[in-house]
Amino acid sequence: MKNILKITFALAFLFTMSSCWGDKTKPNYQYMPDMYKPVGYETYSQNPNFANGMTSQLPVKGTIARGQVPYEYENTPEGYELAKAELKNPLEINEKNLASGKKLYDINCAVCHGKKGQGDGVLVQREKFLGVPNYKDRQITEGSIYHVIMYGRNMMGSHASQLKAKERWQITMYVQKLRSDLLK
Amino acid sequence: MKILYQSRKKIFFLSMKSVKQHSPLSRLVINSLVFLLFFSFNLTAQEGDAANGEKLFKSTCAACHRLDKKLVGPALKGITEKREQDWLIAWIKDNQGLINSGDKLAKEVSESTPAAMTANPQLSDQDIIDILAYTKGEKAAPKAAAAQEVDPGVGRGKKVFKANCAACHKLKGKLIGPELFKIGDKRDPDWLKLWIKDNNALVASGDKLAKEVSESTPAAMTPFPQLSDQDVEDLLKYFAVGDVAKATTPVATSDNKEMFNKPGLGVWTTLGYTILAFILLSLIVAATTNKRDSEDTGDSMLKTLFFNPFLRFLLLIFVLLGGAWLTFGWLMQIDVNVGYQPIQPIKFSHAVHAGDNKIDCQYCHSSAKNSKTSGVPSANVCMNCHKTISEYNGPLFGGNTKEDLDKEIQKIYDAVGWDKENLKYIEGYKQKPVKWIRIHNLADFVNYNHSQHVTVAGVACQKCHGPVETMHDMKQFSPLTMGWCIDCHRNTKVDLTANGYYKNIHDQLAKKYGVKEVTEAQMGGLECGKCHY
């Protein structure tokens, strides 16, 4: 009889062990996590070494991070006009650039501006945003398109943090193509 | 308006005639009628069509203006009381031109705000009058109540579907061809039209998607050049809506194999079977031994079962094996966090953003395409949309009220210091980071690179993260164990068409393994040093 009691205890113990992780809002158990956990600071971890306590920092003022391209036009109506008049796309117009432009456009722009640039993206259809213009109704140049991606315009926000300079130019190229298709 | 104008002309013409033919009385009547008509024409022109104005306002002005609230531009309700109509028309059409012409008021207005207004030369005078009518706050034509009226095209589309497609396609479920329900969500409608009419021509034209689709299945689809554009459009409508009358029954097919792969669930079922087998066995033993024993000693059946040495031995083996199995199962789930669902500082719903509003994953997680880390979007990305959207108006979820969810949006504003009344950032505000809790966390001895999977391999986010677009509260979907990684590497065929640079090596590898397409594992995706270094 004692034997059976012991066995039941052992089984019950095992059951409780196997169903230990009950609270799914906390992470599961780790066993000797020394090699699981990073020695250095992870990308978004807190960091006591900086005044604002974050590991991700903005570039120091006056420096340019590797791979970044400085942009010298100001975020003012004058800057816009200047960029519109003189800024030119450094990339060659080819299939490859247009293809990645399309891919990036569909991710970053189409949700408001529509797949074809008619200002009829999902968010406009669902009336979250209204009055997104059709590209064909606007006098835009490659310079002004790039400028607007960089700084945003009116209620459109800046998309500079989401896209690299090259990607911005590829999108610019694709927007111009959409516009010329619409004007046909 | 055109018709009215014409009829006016006609009646005027008529009245000219009547001057010659009719008595003074009828002349008076007709003349006054003409006058009335003319007047009413003028009247309508002055008032404008508020319904049309509303439409135009939403498509043209609403980006910067609201009726009752300041956005980029001023609130426009009652603007006609403040400014002359002619001035407004000139201003809306070309405000820059008006300023340059030396108009004093225009200059004043433009100087009062840093943002320059976009000129709208595409609007006609009548359009602007309509818009102004709308800004007076006049009631627009009552909107049709959101009655779920079914487009007659759907019915026609169903007919076309039954006549032409149903041989190889079902609306729901795969037949020879793929399932067509909501196909419009997956493919561009224009592409579908071309594909349905003549898929061979589309493949021949070098369309990449068409080629891919045609290669994915051995059966070639019949072209349907006989279908008119209208037919195809009706078809697409039918695909989008489906059978309306038929209630959809959710099909719950549980895959047994998957059940056993999931830690937790598998343990219980297997244990149940084991206990059942044990009881059965002991019954058999009891049935065979009981007769003889009970004749000898007269003990109860239960007692003989307890003290049966064979059964005791059997029980011991079962307990030992079962214990080992359970221990092993428990050890294997250490640090496997499937279902981990922490409470985040903001009730951000992926189902609302990526599901309902169809914002691409990579819009917010923009660094996934270029970097090891798929970044948590910084608050300025939230603000790209939430500058405009300061309250939640969608369907409620998770027991939240609208006020609860509005407060969640307010949390972003508190983090970045946004003044939602005046629509600008508060100067000198000390910004606070939002402390998101990381869910997917690989051990530090594993190297995982997002860009390698997202950009190079073209793996969809959902493959590892699960149906995120349906989750209000984000949780971990995949175990992120090494076995799980390797399974995928073994089964994933590498797409060699996109990059010709390594074609030579790939061909040699394919030859070496005697296969048509190389899998990730055959390319070295199982080598230890690829992920552990």
Image: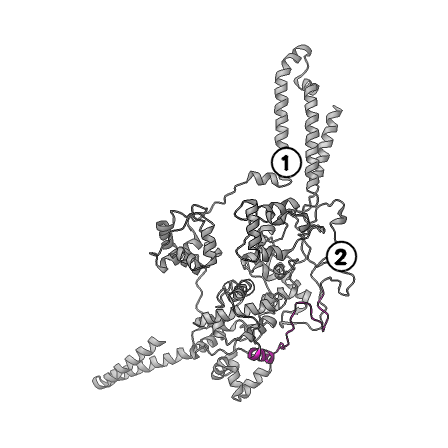
Q: Is residue A102 magenta?
A: no
Task: Please state the horizontal and vertical placement of residue A162, each as a whole percent of the image.
Answer: 62, 65
CA–CA distance in space, label 2 to label 1: 41 Å
Q: Chain of mark 1?
A: B
Q: Is residue B335 left or right of residue B94?
A: right
**Any mark on residue B168, and which?**
none
Task: Please state the horizontal and vertical placement of residue B55, each as a whole percent of the image.
Answer: 46, 70
Q: Looking at the picture, which amino acid does disc 1 mark?
A: Trp
Disc 1 packing (10 Å; few <14; some 14–19; many ≥20):
some
B96 shown above or below B449: below
State the residue position of label 1: B268
Q: Residue furthest right?
A: A49
Q: Start and end of the magenta stretch? A: A57-86
Q: Is residue B440 left or right of residue A117?
A: right
Q: Residue furthest left?
A: B21
Q: Looking at the picture, which amino acid does disc 2 mark?
A: Gly
A161 shown above or below B470: below
- For the residue pair B407 and B91, the one nearer the viewer reads as B91
Q: Chain of mark 2?
A: A
Q: Residue at x 64, y 36 (%)?
A: B267
- For the residue pair B480 and B517, the one nearer the viewer reads as B517
Disc 2 packing (10 Å; few <14; some 14–19; many ≥20):
few
Q: How is the image coloured?
A: one colour
Task: Work out which quarter of the rendered image holds the N terminus of chain A and state it.
Answer: top right
Q: Quadrant of residue B385?
A: bottom right
B259 shown above or below B441: above
Observer able to see residue B71: no
Observer able to see residue B362: yes
State the residue position of label 2: A40
Task: Work out which quarter of the rendered image holds the C terminus of chain A and state it.
Answer: bottom left
